[in-house]
Amino acid sequence: MTEIDTADLTPPALRIRAATPDDSAAVLALMDGIMTWLVGLGRTAQWGTEPWSASAQLVELIESRIDRGELRVAVTGQGEVAGIVSFSTAASGYVRAAEEPELFINLLASSRRFKGQDVGGLLIAEARSEAVRRGLELLRVDCFAGDDGRLTRWYASQGFEEVEPFVVRREGRPDWPGMLFSMRVEPGGAGS
């Protein structure tokens, strides 16, 4: 009987910390890996086909979120970036503004290498904790609602409730269908 090395089958211990400028290349590599996977599946409506690292606009987006202290990274004990979450107190300009103070998740992504290890759930828990630390009771996020709706189902499985669909009009490219979600966050840190 052959022994199975289960080290690769168990989730790694992850630590979440504020991203630093030194993390920029690893964050962009994570996003490029997701792009490669999406393109390989023929799912180009969400982010297109160009790697994030090849787009000056997307590189600037990541770097500016790091500079403003909005980006967190989930890292292994060896420093590998397994996932990222970015949040701020202002929603994206293409969704309806909240009627109360909020924490808004601007970007959430996890490395395909850590698929099935609930890195995304850990990052959502970090966003809920951050909302509590800031005394905010509303956590919102938007996501791509096209293709098979898999992403919207995932956010619902994390405890978010649908608020409303929206469409981002893009010049020279197909419209981008989205869904706005919200979650109430209680002062004790429990999301409902």
Image (cartoon, rainbow, N blue to C red):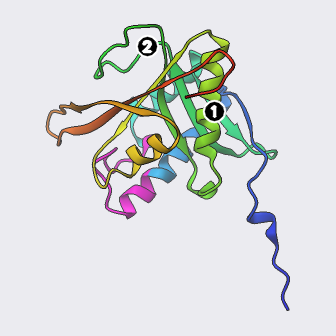
- Circle 1 residue: 125
Kind of element beneath mark 2: loop
Three-letter residue code for mark 2: Ala
Which of the 4 image quadrants contains residue 66? top right
Residue 177 percent location from the top left of the image: 24, 39
Kind of element beneath mark 1: helix
Q: Which residue is drawn at 80% across and 69% down?
A: 6
Residue 71 percent location from the top left of the image: 58, 26
Q: Quadrant where the C terminus lies?
A: top right
Question: Looking at the image, is 185 positioned above or below residue 134?
Answer: below
* Range covered by the magenta-colored residues: 35-52
Residue 82 percent location from the top left of the image: 65, 46
Q: Residue at x 50, y 29 (%)?
A: 62
Name the foreground residue: 24 vs 131: 131
Which of the 4 image quadrants contains residue 43? bottom left
Relative horizontal placement of residue 44, taking residue 60 as reference (left or right): left
Q: Residue at x 56, y 15 (%)?
A: 68
Q: Using the rendered image of the protein, determine whether residue 168 is visible from the camera's viewpoint.
A: yes
